[in-house]
Image (cartoon, rainbow, N blue to C red):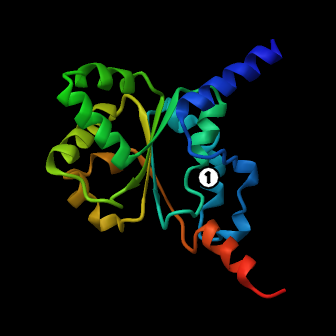
Amino acid sequence: MIERQRKAAERRLKAARFPAAKLLVEFDFAARPSINKPLVLQLVKGDYLDQRENILLVGPSGTGKSHLGMAACAQGRKVRFFRVTELITQLLEAKEERQLLRYRQQLNKLDLLVLDELGYVPASKAGAELLFDVIATAYERNSLIVTTNLPFENWTEVLGSERLTHRCHILGTKGESYGLQDAKRRRKPG
C-alpha cells in the first residue's frame, strides 16, 4: 500500500510538469527574510485549496516562489505547472485546432493551476484574452498560484481585472535569484 501511494505521488508530480523538484523543507527562510514564514507554513497545509483561494507570489525570478505548488502535489492534489507564455501558446493552438473547449475542460479538472512568470513577456491581445478566460473560469472553482515580477499596481494592466486578487494570499519575495547567488559564490576567489 505504501508503495502504491509513493508511485501515485510520483505520477502526480510528473503530470504537474514542474521544471525542477523544489521541496519546502529545502527552502532557506533565513536567506529570504522578506517572506512571511508563518503564512507560508499555513498555506503549505493546503486549506486554501479547499477554500478555492489563490496565491499571488510577487518577486524576482529564482527567489523560491514555486515551492507551494510542489507541496500541493505531494498532498494528493491534481496540479499543473505552466509558464504563462507556454499556456498562452497552447491555448492559441487549441483554439486554432478547434480543441479549446476540450483543453479548458482538462484545466478545469485540476485542483491547482500554477502560472509562472506572468508579465515577463507581453502577450498578444488574443493570448491575454484566453489567459483571462482561464483565470476567470477558475475563480471560486479551482485554486491558482501565480508568480510574477510585476508590481501589484500593474496587475490590472496585464489581466484587465482584479478578480485574481479577490480571495487571494499575497506573498512577496526580494533579493537575488538562487542561481545568481550561487554563481557569485563560485566566482569568488577562495
Left or right placement of residue 34 versus residue 7 in this view:
left
Q: Nearer the viewer, residue 63 or 143?
A: 63
With respect to residue 1, does 172 lie above or below? below
Q: Which residue is situated farthest in the right direction here?
A: 190
Mark 1 Cα shell of 10 Å, populated few (<14), some (14-19), many (≥20): some
Which residue is labeled 1 in the image? 40
Residue for point 35% across, 32% down: 140
Residue type beneath disc 1: Val
User: Can residue 166 be seen in the rendering of this structure?
Assistant: no
Name the quarter where the C terminus is drawn: bottom right
Q: Nearer the viewer, residue 39 or 30?
A: 30
User: Can residue 180 be seen in the rendering of this structure?
Assistant: yes
Q: Nearer the viewer, residue 19 or 145?
A: 19
The secondary structure type at the circle numbered 1 is: helix
With respect to residue 105, does 81 lie above or below? below
Residue for point 24% across, 42% down: 132
Left or right placement of residue 96 versus residue 44 in this view:
left
